[in-house]
Amino acid sequence: MHVDECKLLAQYNQWMNRRLYDVCSHLSDEERKKERKAFFGSIHGTLNHLLLGDQVWLGRFENKPVQVESLAQELYSDFDQLRNERALMDARIIQWTEKLSDKVLDGNLTYTSIVHPVERTQKMAIAVIHFFNHQTHHRGQLTALLNQCGLDYGVTDLIWMPEIDT
């Protein structure tokens, strides 16, 4: 993993989040919050978890740890507020990658796990790969839920992102 790949993944993250929030905006609040037996319950719960996870990991990367109650914690019950915070977080992730260096990626990250609350040290590059993979994993769950609602979210492949040169 190199800085250029991190920048690309941050752009992809922003692109996909904008598109999926646009699709989710066509649902009523009731439909977004409906229990669908997903890992985080609902579409809204999945959106919340994605933002929460990004807050936690970016806090670790910036050495500004974020305290959370649980990985299912609802950050914002209002969709517009959640969407606005998502956009701010995506911009923050892009800014973080702009300051990132290969030297930092080659180093280690020490943090306390939420799932198993012990201090861990990991290669920074592995933690960053996990960060972006985590986003993709849960957006995959979200697209499945949107598909079940009969909504078209379009192509999700990174290679179709408009910024990618063909």
Image (tube, helix red, strand yellow):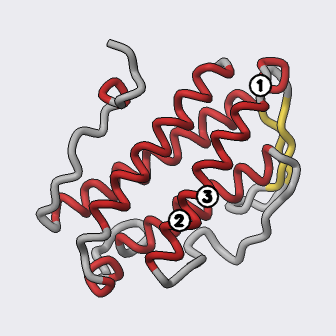
Q: Tell me the distance, in whole angstroms, between the alpha carbons under discs 2 and 3.
A: 16 Å
Q: Quadrant of residue 22?
A: bottom left
- Position of residue 1 relative to residue 134, above or below, is above
Crowd band around label 3 with a 10 angstrom C-alpha radius: few (<14), some (14–19), many (20+): few
- Residue designated by label 2: 49
Crowd band around label 2 with a 10 angstrom C-alpha radius: few (<14), some (14–19), many (20+): many
Q: Position of residue 115 (x, y in %)?
A: 68, 61
Closer to the camera: disc 1 or disc 3? 3
Q: Mark 1 is on which residue type?
A: Leu
Q: Mark 2 is on which residue type?
A: His
For the residue pair 24 and 70, the one nearer the viewer reads as 24
Q: Position of residue 13 (x, y in %)?
A: 49, 43
Q: Tell me the distance, in whole angstroms, between the alpha carbons under discs 1 and 2.
A: 25 Å
For the residue pair 101 and 53, the one nearer the viewer reads as 101
Sooner in the amino-acid sequence: mark 2 or mark 3: 2
SS category of the residue bearing label 2: helix
Sooner in the amino-acid sequence: mark 1 or mark 2: 2
Q: Tell me the distance, in whole angstroms, between the alpha carbons under discs 1 and 3.
A: 24 Å
SS category of the residue bearing label 1: helix
- Residue designated by label 1: 105
Q: Position of residue 20 (x, y in %)?
A: 34, 56
Residue depicted at x 28% and y 54%: 143
Q: Mark 3 is on which residue type?
A: Leu
Q: Are marks 1 and 2 in contact (CB under 8 Å)?
A: no
- Residue designated by label 3: 88
Q: Quadrant of residue 2?
A: top right
Closer to the camera: disc 2 or disc 3? 3
